[in-house]
Amino acid sequence: MNRDPAADQARLSAILAHARAAHHDEAIAQARAALTEGLEHPLLLNLAALGLEREGRGAEAEPLLRRAVQIAPRDLGCRNALGLCLLALERAPEALEQFDAAIGLDPSLGHLHANRGNALRALGAIAAAQASYERAVELDARQAMALAGLSSLACRRGAYSDARAWAQKALAVAPGLPEGAMSLAAAEFGERQLGRAEARLQELLDRKGLSGVERAYVEGLLGDVLDAEGRYEEAFAAYTSCNEALRRHYAGRFARALEYAEALTGWLDRAAAGEPARLAPGAQAAPGAPVKDHVFIIGFPRSGTRLLSVILEGHPQVAALVERECLIEAVLEFMRRPEDLGRLWAASPQTLEHFRAAYWRRVAASGVDPSGKVFVDCCALNTLKLPLIVRLFPTAKILFACRDPRDVVLSGFRNRLAMSAPAYELLTIEGGARYYAAVTQLLIGFTSLLGLEACLVRHEDVVTGFTREMRRVCEFLGLEWHPAMRDFALRERERDEPAPSLAQWAHNLGTEGIGLWRHYRSALEPVRAVLEPWVKRFYYDPD
C-alpha cells in the first residue's frame, strides 16, 4: 500500500513527543498500532520492544530490537536497548558486543560505559568492569548505575567504607535505584550494622516494581543479615523464598545435573562389574606436557577448592588456574552421555594427544604460563571428569578438597552462585544433598576403579592447622613449604575475578564457618540419611 510520508512523519513526531514526556504507556500503545498498520521505524520497534520487556517478554523484544539495529546501525538508542535486552536475558557476551559497538560510535556517553561495566561484571571480568564504571563516572559524575556498580565491586573486595560512599552517591542521584539500595545494605551488612541493613532491605521488599530476580537477591541478602543476627528460622525462610524465585526464573534452562551424575554412576557400576583392568590408566607420561608436574584440585562447590588453589599459588614453583574449564573439547567428545566413555578407552594415542593439545591451548588462552612449574588446575566439578583426567594425564596428582557435607549443602543453598546446571540443583536442600551424594559417590567409585591416589584435604584442617596441613599437601606434591603461601587473601584481592569469599579471607580464615549446619539442624533433618554416610566417611562428628 502507498504511504503518505508527511502523515507518517507527523505520527512519528507525536509518538516521540509522548516518549520524551515520559508518557510511556501511550507511546508504546501508539507504536504498536503503527507497526500493525505497516509503518516500520527504529523508534517504533524500540518502543514496542520496551512494552514487551515491561511485560516480562524480553525474548520477544529481542528480534524487534535487532531489526531496529539492522535498519539504523548507527542509532545509539537502539543498540543500547538491544544490549540491555540481551543483558536481561543473561546473554552478557552478546550484550557486550552491542555496548562496544555503541561506544565505538560515541565514546563520550557515560551510560554506555556503565552498561558495558554491567555486562563485564556479569562475565566475571571484574577489573575491566571497574574500569568501565570509572570511565562512566569520569564522563558523567551523576551516572547512578556506574556508581552503584562501583559500590557492588567494593563490597566484593570487602572495602565496605568505599562501598558505602559509592552507594550513597548513587542514591543521591537516583533515590529509588534498587541496586544502589542493595549495595548500601550489603556495605552495612559487611560493617555489621545489621539493624540498618535489615531495615533497608525490608523497605526494598515493600516496594512495587522490583523484578523477580531483584526481589530474590534482596531476600537472599536479608537471609544473610538475619543469619548474622542469630535468627536462623527467619533466615532460612528468606533463603528459601530467594531460591524458589530463582528456581522459577531459571526453570527449564539447564540440563539436569543430578540426572547426569546418576547416569554416570550407572555407567561406573557396569564398568566395575565388567573389566576394570581395561580401564586402568597407562603408566606412561602424557607427551608434550609443558609443566614440571600437573595437579587437579577436585571436590564439590563450596568445599574449599578455590581456597586451596589460591594458597598453593603462593608457592614460587606453582602456577594455578582457578575455576576455568579447560577440558571442554574432551567433554564434548567423550562425555556428552556416559556411554561415550567407552570410546575414551578405545581412543588412539593420536586422538588423545589431540585433546591434550586442546586443553593446553585453553590454559595458554587463560593467561597463565605454567612452563616448568607445578601446574594446579582447580575446577571443583572436574570430579565428574576423572576418567578424562586419568586418560589424558595419567601421571597427574589429585587433591580432593573436602568439607563437612552438611556445611557444603547449606552453603550452596545460602549463597547466590552464578547459575549453572549444578548451581540449580543447590537451590533446594534436598537437591543439593542428593547431588552432593551422587558426585561424591562418583569420586569414590572412580578412585577405586581407576586405581587413583588422591590426597584428601579437609577444609576444617586447613582452617585450624594451616601450616601443618599445607606442609602435608606440599609433601604429597613434592614441594617444600613456602611462607608466601600464607598471603592468599592479598593475592586474591589483586585477581581480576576475586572469590566471593574474599571479604571473609581478608580478615582471617577463622573457625566461625565450621559447623554452621548446627544452626539449621531442623532444616537439614530431611536429608540426614542422604548425607550421613559421607559425614562418617570423611571423619566428621555425626552430631
Image: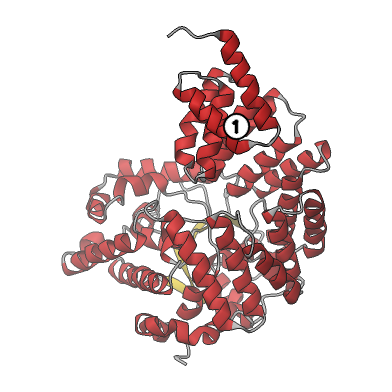
Q: Secondary structure at mark 1?
A: helix
Which residue is more in the foreground, 301 or 191? Answer: 191
- Crowd tier of the residue under label 1, counting other residues whose Cα lies within 10 Å: few below 14, some 14–19, many 20 or above: many
- Counting from the top left corner in percent of width and height, residue 366 is at 57, 45
Q: Up-down: is 175 above or below 487?
A: above
In the rendered image, the quadrant that contains the N terminus is: top left
- Counting from the top left corner in percent of width and height, residue 427 is at 45, 66
Q: Amino acid at mark 1?
A: Ala
Residue 74 visible, this angle: no
Quadrant hosting residue 12: top right
- Counting from the top left corner in percent of width and height, residue 132 is at 72, 41
- Counting from the top left corner in percent of width and height, residue 151 is at 75, 55
Quadrant hosting residue 137: top right
Q: In percent of the image, x 62 and y 16: which residue is there? A: 10
Using residue 306 as the reference point, say whether residue 341 is left or right of it.
Answer: left
Residue 362 visible, this angle: yes
Q: Up-down: is 45 above or below 388?
A: above
Which residue is more in the foreground, 492 or 210? Answer: 210
Q: Which residue is mark 1?
A: 27
Using residue 240 as the reference point, say whether residue 494 is left or right of it.
Answer: right
Q: Up-down: is 10 above or below 290?
A: above
Using residue 438 as the reference point, say whether residue 379 is left or right of it.
Answer: right
